[in-house]
Amino acid sequence: MYKIAVIPGDGIGPEVINSGVEVLKALSKTEPNLNIEFTTFDWGGDYFRKNGEMMPESGVEQLKEYDTIYFGSAGDPDIPDHVTLWGLRLKICQGLDQYANLRPVRLLPGINSPLRDVSEKDIDWSFIRENSEGEYSGIGGRSHKGYSHDTSMDITLFTRKGVERIQKFAFEIARSRPRKLLTLVTKSNAQRHGMVMWDEIFEEVSQDYRDVTTDKMLVDAMTTRMVLDPKSIDTVVASNLHADILTDLAASLSGSMGIAPTGNLDPDKRHPSMFEPIHGSAFDIMGKGIANPIGSYWSSVMMLESLGEISASKRLMSAIEKLTSEKKILPKDLGGSSSSIEITEAMINIILGKNY
Ligand code: IPM
Ligand code: MG
């Protein structure tokens, strides 16, 4: 029996996560050994309005009791973004030391890329985002607010331990993929301290992975390569902010922000990992019933994989691919006109082997 903590959060989070839970329930009916108990937490913007915080003080401790976490999104039109982000999602990622953020990017069958002449085999990437420090260390400060010498500072922090562990993780992922090719994204020409250490450690770690081919790209040049030569890319490791930016581009090149999944992982398995679609709260379409739940299904695939439920995760991924390739029921952002509910029903029927 797996205990899953479900945090739907804000905006379209509840719409896509509830759909994801329905689909997981259908899947567990057809997999005799897959038993899941879902526990939902009402943390987020409304919780903040009632309690003055995005989740209770003991929130991170409570989550440690679960096998894994299924997250929607955090954000609220009436609460500053840095408050919602640091009060929930980053608090969980840092609190559980989920230091590796894994972002698979693939052009799924039936989906069009905005790039000309690319096929499914040209966009099959694995992005590894450092998820505990770098530009998101949270260290910094603000002083003299309201005066003309108003001052602010955000510290980009790289620790040897933090850099080594994410780069080892990236080499392991690269090694597990057929091409065994890892690109280091850097900006050591301009960021002359932290990123220089980042490059040096990459060189050191690579000595233990001589079977993996490596190359190095400045982050600005990487955007060009993703657009002009996508098939030259396989596995990519980048700092927290660099990967944040590159993976939005990656998601759009693979069809839509709506399909992209992510896992905030603790590869050392001390604590539960957390899986979520990367699209965020999308208030402009909230409550309209048109949110694309595919990112949350793909996140479930990653979640099942991390639990060791390989056959269930493969079946769920095949169901997603059937949905996209047959193009009968697709959300608006993928050129269709189906509602989130119609997509949920279609997925459940595919899983149960019924017509849809
Ligand atoms: C992501 C998102 C978040 C981030 C936002 C919602 C704060 O863009 O997961 O990529 O910047 O990390
Ligand atoms: Mg992002």
Image (cartoon, grey):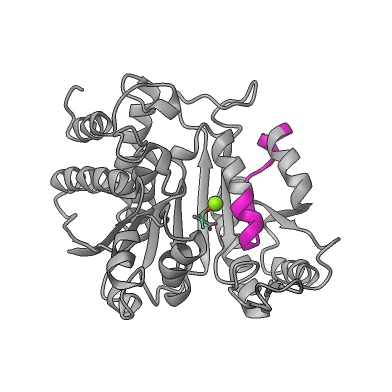
Asked whether 44 or 333 is in front, the reply is 44
> At 63% from the left edge and 26% from the top edge, which residue is drawn?
115
Nearest the eye: 211 or 276: 276
Q: Quadrant of residue 175?
A: bottom right
80 to 260, vertically: above or below: below
Question: In percent of the image, x 63 and y 59: which residue is there?
Answer: 241
Q: Is residue 301 left or right of residue 31?
A: right
Furthest residue in direction front, as rendered: 147
Q: Position of residue 170 (x, y in %)?
A: 60, 61
Residue 331 visible? The answer is: yes
Quadrant of residue 320 in the image?
top left
Camera sees residue 307: no
Q: Position of residue 122 (x, y in %)?
A: 61, 32
**Left or right: where 116 falls relative to 59:** right
Q: Find residue 251 and report its horizontal and vertical position in percent.
A: 54, 40
Of 314 and 262, which appears nearest the observer?
Answer: 262
Q: In the image, is residue 238 part of the stretch drawn in magenta?
A: yes
Q: Is residue 253 above or below residue 56?
A: above
| Residue segment shown in magenta | 228-245
* Above or below 182: residue 64: below
Identify the image quadrant of the C terminus: top left
State left or right for residue 211 relative to residue 45.
right
Query: Residue at the location (56% across, 27% down)?
Result: 113
Residue 54 lies in the magenta-colored region: no
The vertical placement of 107 against 153, above or below, is: above
Residue at 52% x, 38% y: name it: 106
Residue 193: image quadrant is: bottom right
Task: State the image coordinates of residue 171 (x, y, percent, origin top left).
Answer: 62, 61
Dividing the image into 4 quarters, which one contains the N terminus?
Answer: bottom left
